[in-house]
Image (spheres, rainbow, N blue to C red):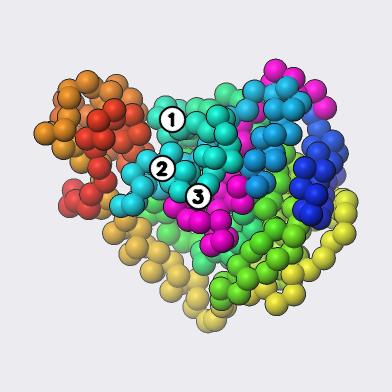
Amino acid sequence: MKKHSVIIRDATDLPQAIAEIFKLLGPTDLARRSVFVKPNILRAARVQECVVTDPRLISETVSFLQGAGAQVMVGDNPMPDQRSSSEGEIAGYCGIVDAAGNTYRNIGRYPKKMRKPNNLLREFYVSREILDCDLLVSLPKYKSHELTTMTLAVKNHFGIIPGGFKPAIHALFPRIDDFSRVIVEIYETRPPDVIIVDCMEVIDAQGKRYRPGMIIGGDNGHAVDYACALMAGIDPLRVPTVRVAREQGLFAPEMIEYNGAFRRIHGFSLPFVFPFRNSIVEFVSRILYRIWMGRVPVIDADLCSGCRSCENVCPPRAIKGKCIDYSKCIKCYCCLEVCPRRAIRIRYKLV
């Protein structure tokens, strides 16, 4: 097994830190290569909430790549909500569209169906842009997570799944261990080539704010997540995706080579552990995601022009005219993204 590089850099001089990470990880020749940059856009949130990738990291990463001659695209698949009905609006609210400049793209429109018969999740959809790029750069946010303890490089890759198909996966695999295995499967579909974790300003599970002022780079998401868990002061195998990856031989802790000053974030709190916690979390998650699955696209016939854009883009061909067959709908929301007249909205509906 090859060694895994984990690079810790002070973010005071962010452009220099990013340049050093790319120099150490490679590739050296980026000219004319297509590079996709995938931040973490969980939901519509301001940067001070510390739940989305800091726009400064996105802006400086794009600047570095463009300076090297790369053809850059930035995008993610956040869930639409009542305030923001498309991924572009959500990214705009987060400040990420401005940070990405003219490189931001809507990647929720043309997903590709993946078939993995040996996986726990045998069929799923991935944004085509993720699969087509020459180089994939992941910019996760350092944060805690009720279900998977921490959400870092591997969990950030859940965002390559378009729209509402993510809650569907949650609903299909409510057990933490099963869900974590599925997350690892999705990550391994197309692992990123370069990872830079935003650990500049973070909030722990109790809402306490820290300013570590760091970015953490690497080329193996499992090794990066292992190191990030150590920084939080916990046994990394407490993070179920890390445990699954180690069991499957996808990385080895003893093969990690650290470059830079490794320092712990003292006092960083993670979700409270108590007897039967996992069972309770799984039960609550099962209920919440079943409720969430009631969110479906609905066509407003009065606004619809009959252009058939939604019908043409729908992966399972669930739309005919102005009608949606909800028995086929996978809630990817591609229809919502392509509608030129905003005639499709997300509503709760009994199906």
Q: Are marks 3 and 2 in contact (CB under 8 Å)?
A: no
State the extent of the magenta-drawn residues as a range. 28-55
Query: Can residue 197 be seen in this snapshot?
Result: yes
Tell me residue 298's x, y (percent).
20, 41
Please name the amino acid that badge 1 sits on: Pro
Mark 2 element type = helix
From this view, report whether residue 102 is shown above or below residue 290: above
Residue where numbered disc 2 is placed = 89
As drawn, 65 above or below 6: above
Q: Position of residue 246 (x, y in %)?
A: 71, 54
Q: Which residue is mark 3?
A: 94
Q: Nearer the viewer, mark 1 or mark 2?
A: 2
Q: Viewer-nearest of labels 3 and 1?
A: 3
Q: How many marks?
A: 3
Q: Are the residues flagged by discs 3 and 1 in contact, CB closer than 8 Å?
A: no
> Mostly what secondary structure, the magenta segment?
loop
Task: Tell me the residue that label 1 is attached to.
Answer: 111
The amino acid on which the numbered mark 2 sits, given as a three-letter code, is: Glu
Residue 29 among those drawn in magenta: yes
| Separation (CA) of disc 1 from disc 2 | 19 Å
Residue at left offset 22%, top offset 35%: 343
Task: Look at 57% across and 24% down and name the residue there.
Answer: 132
Q: Position of residue 228 (x, y in %)?
A: 72, 59
Circle nearer the N terminus (3, 2): 2
Q: Earlier in the sequence, mark 1 or mark 2?
A: 2
In this rendering, the answer to whether 60 lies above or below 321 is below
